[in-house]
Image (cartoon, coloured by chain):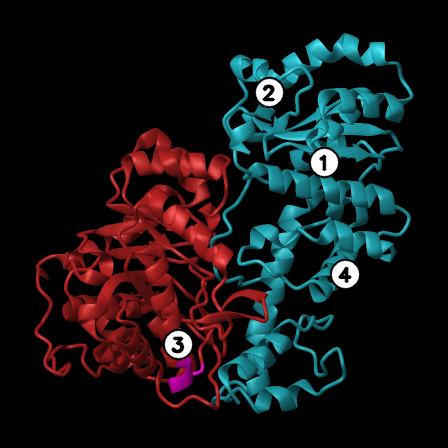
Chain colours: A cyan, B red
Amino acid sequence: MDLEQLQRIVLGVIQQPLTSSEGMRKRTLDGRPVKKIVDEVIKPNDRLTSFERLEIYNRVYWFRLLSSLMEDFPGLRAIIGERKFEKLAVSYLTDRPSESFTLRNLGARLEPWLRQHPEFTPKVPRLALDMVRLEWADIDVFDQAELPKLTADDLRSLGEDPIFHFQPYLRLLDLAYPVDELLLSIRHGEEQESDIASNVVLERAQKSPGPRLRLPKREKVYLAVHRQEEETVYFKRLEPDAFALLCALQQGKTLSQAIEESVNWTHGKVENITGQLHDWFANWSSLGWFCKPSAE
Amino acid sequence: MPANKFNGYSDYGIGIGLRIPHYNHIFEKKPVVDWFEIISENFMIDGGRPLKVLDQILDQYRVVQHGVSMYFGSAEPLNREHLRRLKTLVKRTKTPWLTDHLCWGSVDGKYSHDLLPMPYTFEAARKTAQKIREVRDFVEVPIAVENVSSYAEYHVSEMTEWEFLNEVVEQADCGILLDVNNIYVSSQNHSFNPFDYLNSIAPERVAQIHIAGHSKFEKYILDTHDHPVLDPVWDLYARAIELAGPTATLLEWDDRIPSFEEVHHEALKAKKFLKGKQQPVPMDGHAVISPYTNARPDAAEKARA
């Protein structure tokens, strides 16, 4: 058995979901006996069988990854509850094992996965999906690059029908629920940020169920997730026509094309948009959302 | 402190890990600390608050980078994106040397996010050494590899852990980040004498030392980094200093993190072992006379008590 074969066998066992009593499974998900697999690879000692020795790694793997997802998605946890969140997280991580060297990216594929698996969020599929989109945007915006901002001189050089370039830390979300308010209220009860440098997870992270969450009613929200002051992530609600305009601009459309798309999307009037353009751009510029064309 | 090519001929003292709960204290009180160790992966990002904090730290302190996911021992090729980001960070911190673990943790692009123990085979040693060389050539700073604590061993192993460590660092011509707590944890889990391990490593390759606390369970010990350093680990540290000479030392405290003062105070206990050890003992086939040589772990514990 060469190095790669051995590592494939060991990681395959470690990534098998735990039993309900948080032990290692006796059979793999495809029905093979784990003891036989492990005995061929791992030495026992005078205190622990081969199975028990690898079980330590199996438990640590799941405790660490579940703790990380719990920390990243407190909003989703609050909406569907701790037990359903755990089932969802185990299925997600089993279907989509981490492909990044950093735990920061663990939830990067949760939104598309959840779109394919609404059965994990019965009764609240769109609310849960909106929350996941917002929570991932929040993680992603937090440490994106900040490029040199567009100046008034730069603006003048862009021409009559300019194309704008945006900071990498700006995300635009159209939401069916006001999950921005919901997440802020959930966070209000959460502890302050903690360090994740430890390479050992001794115990399963436990969260006691808080007071029953009051779920919001449907309400269209157009949101910009961005960074400002002290590198803090902020949520800014936008008018529908401003949101549509920004989306088109972010996709690389010229200003005139973006205005046309916004009008078509909102069934509004061109005058309504052009009348507000100055104020909108003044506000977005003051927030630093535009960057120099060459900087992107 | 002995400067050698594996720690960039630097002369660092006692450091502690840079951790979020201590940020306010550090920026408000500006405590005197020889150096901070950062977890590289926490700063291998494009922007935002973590890098702003790091830049503030770099203005006032010396920083050494410690990685947790390069996985020198994984059979698969190195992750180019990881390497690119690591090099960018190295340029920012100007770390005199770079450390990561002698372990594996990924297969077929799937990550465990754990420090998995190596099979101690000649094939694994050769492949691991090759990857260490590749990383060093790319990032252009000296590399030291850390021995990990482990809870399992493989049937295919052809040598002891310390023989494997020596094999890898010789082939890679790299340094050692000697974690004496990990030696102790593994010695208890695998029933070997930790001083046999210490006495066998090449002290001239030791670039840095880690000390930390651990947790005892009924049938094994876990490397938890959530306690003060225990006496048997201090005994190993004393022996390591005896062999390698005063060496850059770092206290790891990553979970249930107490106040900055408490962590720093615990780290500074290492000072008494460093005093008066200006030169390493002569190396002649590890034939060093010492009260710790060949001491049994339990005897060492009693000696401290």
Residue at screen point 53% across, 58% down = A101
Q: Nearer the viewer, residue B243 or B51?
A: B51
Residue at disc 2, secondary structure: loop
Q: Nearer the viewer, residue B178 or A226?
A: A226
> What separation in Å lies between label 1 and label 4 (alpha carbons)?
21 Å
Residue A187, horizontal then vertical, whole percent? 66, 36
Chain to which mark 3 belongs: B
Disc 4 marks which residue? A87
Q: Which residue is mark 3?
A: B186
Identified by mark 1, the residue type is Leu
Q: Which residue is mark 2?
A: A287
Vertical position of residue A13 compared to residue B156: above or below: above
Q: Residue at x 42, y 45 (%)?
A: B19
Q: Which residues are magenta?
A: B119-124
For label 3, the SS is: helix
Percent across and percent down for residue A40 are: 57, 91
Q: CA distance from mark 3 to mark 1?
A: 43 Å
Considering only order in the chain, which callout, 2 or 4, is on the residue closer to the N terminus?
4
Residues at discs 4 and 3 both on one chain? no
Question: What is the three-letter code of the residue carrying label 4?
Answer: Lys
Residue occupied by mark 1:
A183
Q: Does the CB distance between marks 2 and 3 fall below 8 Å?
A: no
The chain letter under disc 4 is A
Label 1 lies in what chain?
A
Q: Are marks 1 and 4 on the same chain?
A: yes
